Amino acid sequence: MPTVQIIYATGSGHTEYVVNVLAAHLRENAAHVSVTLTRAEQATPDDMTKSDVVILASGSWNTGGVEGQMHPFMVEFLGKRAKDVELKKKRCTVIALGDERYYYTARAGEHMRMFLIDHGADMFMDPLTVVNDPYGQEEKVRKWCDRFVSLLLKKS
């Protein structure tokens, strides 16, 4: 049974909502896939290595006055606790959220993607990008999830 670890950072609850929609769809439509959700502030480097696939999820913030950064909990997790993790071709992807009012909409996805690449991950699937309020975008999440499962099973 393939295992999926989703590590996410949320402040307003939007990222948590998206990963919960994704996890529910996986559990309902891909029962042969085991999914675990872990908040970034509780995650450990082992959470990035013990599953078959890792998904990082974060909204984009203006951390430190600089637009387009990851949520501070994700910055702390990736920049400190997981900074030395070796992903060695681990299959990974990202979920980025953002607001179209900002120039660097959903740029957190780029930061997470670069972290994963720099640590040896196999970015086996395009990111899911959710712009603006995620409520009403559930079908987009479910369609991405279906493609995710298809690719996951092809590469298993």
Image: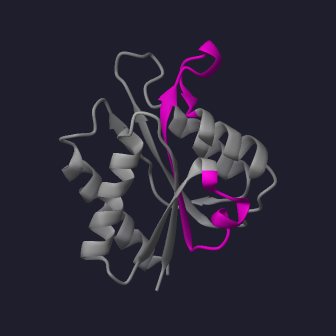
- Farthest-out residue, right: 84
Q: Say whether residue 114 is magenta.
A: no
Query: Does residue 21 appear in this view?
Result: yes
Residue found at the far front of this picture: 42
Which stretch did the figure color magenta? 42-71
> Count of labels shown?
0
Quarter assignment of residue 28: bottom left
Q: Could you say which is closer to the camera, residue 27 or residue 130?
A: 27
Residue 139, image x, y percentages: 19, 52
Q: Position of residue 7 (x, y in %)?
A: 54, 55
Give the residue at x 54% y 18%: 67
Residue 62 sits in which quadrant?
top right
* Above-or-below relation of 69 to 147: above
Locate residue 12, reporting x and y percent.
40, 33
Picture coordinates of residue 154, whole percent (x, y): 42, 78
Lateral position of residue 16 relative to residue 111, left or right: left
- Residue 74 in the image: above or below residue 145: above
Q: Is residue 50 magenta?
A: yes
